[in-house]
Image (spheres, rainbow, N blue to C red):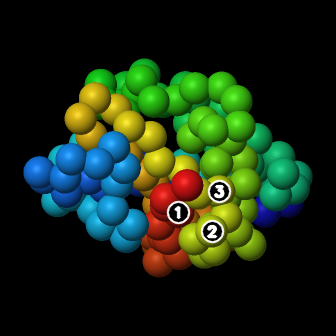
Amino acid sequence: MADYYYHLEVYSCREKHNVQAVGEKNYEVPGRNVWTFKHTEAGAASAAAAKTAFLAAFDAALPGAPDAIKYIKASGSGSLNAALSTSATTTNDGVASSGPWNERSGKDVLAYKIGVSTTNAAGALTNLTAHNLS
């Protein structure tokens, strides 16, 4: 049994006046369309069980996200949930090419960062890595 700490940030990655329908790799628009989601899964039987609980908690919390963010989750291989299924592990959270994803939402493009730790919430924040762009 182990504890797992998750820190997820969904953020805007499209520069102002960019006419392209894609975001900028490793770019974050300060203060625009940022949503932070934190989850702790205490006493998880396995890493897989902790990840399943994290994804369920993410789904449950998504309706409370800002409008530009809460409408982006879709099912299928291109969804944020599918990307998180790959990257939300202690092995893959620091690998930027693991679970790359970005989604256009209105005139914006969103990407995400995730950190996972078995030590504490501060460790998850330290492990935060951008996983963009697909």
The answer for how far apart the CA atoms under marks 3 and 1 are is 6 Å
SS at badge 1: loop
Q: Quadrant of residue 71?
A: top left
Towards the viewer: 61 or 78: 78
Decide if residue 10 is in sight here.
Answer: yes
Of pointers 3 and 1, the one earlier in the residue sequence? 3
Q: Residues within 10 Å of mark 1 (few under 14, many from 20)?
A: many
Look at 63% across and 74% down and name the residue there. Answer: 95
Q: Is residue 43 left or right of residue 98?
A: right
Above/below status of 119 relative to 72: below
Q: Quadrant of residue 134?
A: bottom right
Q: Residues within 10 Å of mark 2 (few under 14, many from 20)?
A: some
Towards the viewer: 60 or 119: 60
Residue 99 screen position, x and y as percent: 65, 56
Q: Amino acid at mark 1?
A: His
Q: Is residue 46 left or right of residue 78?
A: right
**Pointer 1: what residue?**
131
**Pointer 3: what residue?**
99
SS at badge 3: loop
SS at badge 2: loop
Look at 45% across and 54% down and name the residue there. Answer: 112
Q: Amino acid at mark 2?
A: Ser
Q: Residues within 10 Å of mark 3 (few under 14, many from 20)?
A: many
Of pointers 1 and 2, the one earlier in the residue sequence? 2
Which quadrant is the N terminus positioned in? Answer: bottom right
Q: Amino acid at mark 3?
A: Gly
The answer for how far apart the CA atoms under marks 1 and 2 are is 6 Å
Is the C-beta separation of discs 3 and 1 under 8 Å? yes
**Pointer 2: what residue?**
97
Tell me how many marks there are.
3
Is the C-beta separation of discs 1 and 2 under 8 Å? yes
Towards the viewer: 91 or 96: 96
